[in-house]
Image (cartoon, rainbow, N blue to C red):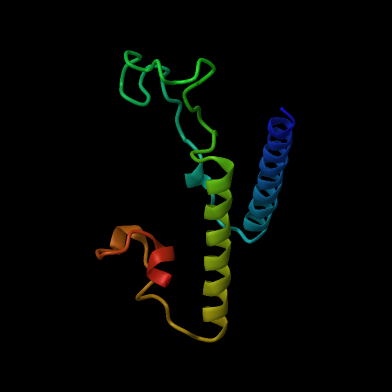
Amino acid sequence: FALAGVAAVATAGATKRIEARMEEAMDVAKSKGIDLSDLYYDFDLPGDAYPFGDAEGMDWVPKDWKPPKKGDMKYLPSRMLGMVQVRISLYDLLQECEQKNIDVSDVCVPFEGYEGPFDTNQKRMM
């Protein structure tokens, strides 16, 4: 029982640290003018429309589960932290390229104008 208690405390501490790091990263991103709006739901999802379109067969979903609402994060804090950190790194890289007059327009293009094997700017920049 003692090990379970230690594990629970460690998990709670790690979760709080991830959330704190996520908030710090979001503050940095906002200070740099990085848009994070696509990481949040921009609409309310009806209770019976997620994930399979009806409530039948959703007995595996926790009882306290609620469908996402406008403004809720699309991802768990650990993934959200990673996504924000990648955007900050990409922003910094683009700024450095701009300062050194390095043209990256061929690898960093808007999604609407891109047709190719990579689905994100981060993957294209790698």
Find residue 33 and report its image quarter: bottom right
| Identity of the residue drawn at 68% across and 37% down | 7
Count the marks: how many?
0
Left/right of residue 23 with respect to residue 47 in the rendered view: right
Relative image position of residue 114 (x, y in whole percent): 29, 64
User: Which residue occupies 71% across, 40% down?
Assistant: 10
Quadrant where the image shows the N terminus: top right
Please report the residue visible at 68 percent of the width from the left and 52 percent of the height from the top. 27
Residue 76 percent across, percent down from the top left: 54, 40
Image: 124 above or below 102 = above
Q: Is residue 7 above or below residue 80?
A: above
The answer to whether residue 108 is visible is no
User: Residue 58's quadrant in the figure?
Assistant: top left
Q: Is residue 24 visible?
A: yes
User: Which of 17 and 10 lies nearest the eye of the viewer?
Assistant: 10
Q: Is residue 49 left or right of residue 16?
A: left
